[in-house]
Image (cartoon, rainbow, N blue to C red):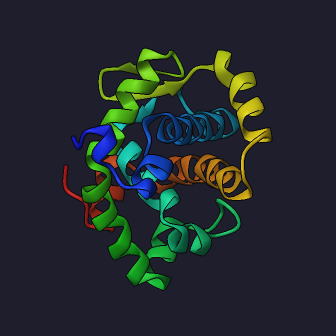
Amino acid sequence: MIAWHDRTIEERNLLNPAFCAIVLWHLARGFQTEGAETSEEESGFPIQFAFIGTSFVLRGQTRNQLPRTVATSLTAWIHDHPMERSAVAKGVVVLRPYIREALIFGAQHGAISLAGMSLSASESFSRQISNYLRQSSVEVRDCARQAQFVGRWLRRGGTTPTIMALLGVQA
């Protein structure tokens, strides 16, 4: 990991552990919400999806290409957006150290909890995150909103290995 003072301004702003932990919290919350709405058996947000989900959300061009509803299948979206599929796969590799750092940060501060190979959003952080988002820029709020959407979308997308294969991501 690059020392904090050696990071670029962009890295410090977009890829700082606190912001990425908020994105992870929204991804996990969306995944949990979709599971509750579809009456699926409770399961945590697969840790592999932390890397995939942030890759969808943190790249503005990809985020802007996301479908409007979770009814759009991931398979159909990938078929219609082959360049974005490639960008997501590359983003998983590039973002890996930052997301690992955010997972640790989020867990240490109690925003997310890790259990085995899955994580969950702590409901006790809902108010703090809402307060933070009220004072944030439109782009930060959009990242949070889209992260929650991507969490829901991934829940509907299939099994973890299937989604990873569709995106060309290796464990």
As drawn, the residue found furthest toward the right would be 134
Q: Nearer the viewer, residue 159 or 149?
A: 149
Quadrant in which residue 34 is drawn? top right
- Vertically, is 140 above or below 59? above
| Residue 125 % position (x, y) | 65, 20
Quadrant in which residue 10 is drawn? bottom left
- The residue that appears at 26% across and 67% down in the rendered structure is 168
- The residue that appears at 80% across and 40% down in the rendered structure is 134
- Vertically, is 65 above or below 53? below
* Quarter of the picture holding the N terminus: top left
| Residue 119 % position (x, y) | 43, 27
- Vertically, is 133 above or below 105? below
Locate residue 124 relative to residue 163 in the image: left or right.
right
Q: Nearer the viewer, residue 127 or 50?
A: 127
Q: Nearer the viewer, residue 32 or 133?
A: 133
Quadrant in which residue 27 is drawn? top right
Locate residue 121 relative to residue 95 in the image: left or right.
right
- The residue that appears at 46% across and 25% down in the rendered structure is 106
- The residue that appears at 44% across and 41% down in the rendered structure is 16
- Vertically, is 70 above or below 134? below
| Residue 73 % position (x, y) | 55, 67
| Residue 44 % position (x, y) | 46, 28
Q: How many marks?
A: 0
Locate residue 79 relative to residue 57 in the image: left or right.
left
